[in-house]
Structures are given as C-alpha cells and as structure tokens.
Amino acid sequence: MKDTLAQTGGGRSALRLERRLAHPPEKVWRALTDPAQLVHWFPSEVQVELEIGGRMGFVFPGREAPDMDGVVTELDPPHVFAFTWGEDELRWELRPEGDGCVLTLTHTFGDRFGAASFASGWHACITGLAALLGGEEIAHGDMAELHEKYVEAFELAEGAVETTEDGGWRLRFERQLVRPAETAWRTLTGPADDTPEPAAGAPVPFGFRTDAVPAGPITEAHPPRVLAYAWERDGRPAGTVRWELTQGTGHGARLILTQTGPADAEAERTEAQRAWRHHIGLLAAELLKG
C-alpha cells in the first residue's frame, strides 16, 4: 500500500493510492466501469457514456439529479479509465501482477487541505471495491481516525507564515476537521450548560487561546463560526487572532486560524506557531471522541 500527496502545477495537488487486488484486471475493470457495480462501492451513483469524451453524471444519496458532471478523458480497457469529476480529475490504472493486479488511483484537485478527507474516503471506497470483488460484505465505518492519520502523513497540520503589507506577519493554519462546526465550537467553548455563549467584550474561552499568545477580550463573535480577539505583548495589543469554522469537504468543518503580528515579534511568532500546532492537534484529538 502506497499513499502519497504531491504538488502539481497551478496550485493543484495529486493524491495517489496504490493497492494490490487478488483479481485479474478484467474483473476489476468491470467493477470500475459498470454503474451496477459502481453503486456498491463508489461514493455516488454513476451515469457514464463509456467512450472518450463521453458524459458522466454523479448522483449522491438523497438526490434525483446529478450533483456533478464529468467527461471521460482516457479509456484503455482493461487498463486505464480516467475522467473529470467536477473540477477534479480521477485516473484509475490497472497493472497485471501474478494472478491479480495493482490498482493505482490518482486524484488531482485544488483543495490541498481536503487531501486527508479525500484519502480516507478513497481508502474506504477501494476497501469496499475489494470486498465486492471477493463476494464479501462491504462495511461502512467512521473514518475519523484514518483521516487524522492522513493529516499527519501528508503534513497538513503545519502552519504557514506570510508577510503582510505593513511588513508584519500573518500565521495561518488550515485544517479539515472530522466533525461539524457546531460540535467543534462547543468543544472550544465548553459545555453549553456551564458556559455562556462568547460575545464581544467577554474573556476568550480557554479552547480558543494558548498560553503562548496572551489574549485580550473578544472583539468579534458569531457562534458557531467566528471568534476573534487581540493578542497582547507587554499588556498592549500587538496583533489579532481569528478563528473561523467554514464549509469543509462534507466530512466536517474547515478550521482556519490566523494570527497577525508586527515585524519585531519574530520570537513570539515562532512560539505561537509551535503552540497553535499543538493546540489544534488537541482539538482534533478531542473531536475523535465525539
């Protein structure tokens, strides 16, 4: 099993999953291209015109019309089946090996921070494909723990530093979470029965701060999506901290945490980067329990 994530041109990423299957390419090919078999393991129902340039439609559970469209871009039975999936590209390749074959999926997309969701999702789908081919029952479980393993494996938990127009810096973390915004917000604020909802002027709840970044009062709060405050140095405002819980890949909310600071606060920035990485990791671990 080989799973990798690489950057490609134009700010896009390529996720590559490789699995050995105990079935010949011809048998696997039918499961990759026949809508009657795809419905059992692919994340949506599939409508396909099996020819180069053929139209595709992807209908997700509970919908009647296609949610996304696609086009067949490569077709070499029983070796290569490639198509667009909305703005993404999927390429399935089968290589004979002994009595079975090696399946390689390459998923190219623009949302780098969605990579752990895509990887855990395709991991589950290919596991389902293998079960279907073997005549076994397809199990659907919680992929949250697998998702977090991919976050670490693909180094998606690290923060990035940008230079701002005034010569200062902006520290930015983006992380796909495994639970909805409401669940993440409640984890950050504390139990609803014990804690009032955050509001401007109130102290920052413990979950939204770290000892390395002294917090002033809340400046903006829009539960369960946004909380912002000024962080302080020597008792005076030095920059801002902003938490946002936005729409993610469908597996949960997307967390975007930013902190700004002046150019002469490099030591504080370095410490904040380390502290926020750890803090967000604790949040992610707590959400696994939910």
Image: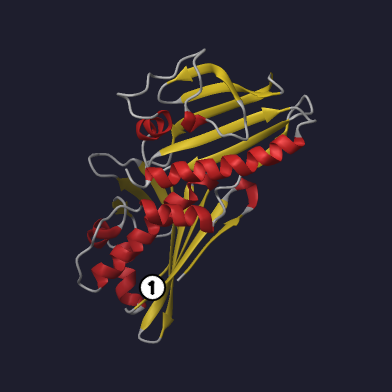
- Label 1 sits on a secondary structure element that is loop
| Quarter location, residue 69 | top left
The three-letter code of the residue at mark 1 reads: Pro
Left or right relative to 255: residue 126: left
Q: Taking the image as drawn, is residue 33 in sight?
A: yes
Dot 1 surroundings within 10 Å: few (below 14), some, or many (20 or more)?
some
Q: Where is residue 76 shown, x and y percent of the image?
A: 43, 69
Q: Nearer the viewer, residue 261 or 63?
A: 261
Q: Residue at x 23, y 60 (%)?
A: 139
Q: Nearer the viewer, residue 267 or 107?
A: 267
Residue 290 sits above or below residue 231 on the image? below
Q: Residue at x 38, y 30 (%)?
A: 190
The image's colour scheme reads: secondary structure
Q: Which residue is mark 1?
A: 78
Residue 15 sits above or below residue 197 on the image? below
Specify the farthest residue to the top. 201
Query: The C terminus lies in which quarter of the figure?
Result: top left
Query: The N terminus lies in which quarter of the figure?
Result: bottom left
Q: Nearer the viewer, residue 168 or 117?
A: 168
Q: Tell me how many marks there are.
A: 1
Left or right relative to 52: residue 143: left
Left or right relative to 95: residue 30: left
Q: Residue at x 60, y 32 (%)?
A: 258
Q: Taking the image as drawn, is residue 54 in sight?
A: no
Q: Where is residue 41 shown, x and y percent of the image?
A: 28, 59
| Quarter location, residue 100 | bottom left
Q: Residue at x 33, y 47 (%)?
A: 58
Q: Where is residue 196 shown, x and y percent of the image?
A: 37, 19
Left or right relative to 185: residue 211: right
Q: Nearer the viewer, residue 210 or 136?
A: 210
Residue 163 sits above or below residue 239 on the image? below
Specify the farthest residue to the bottom. 98
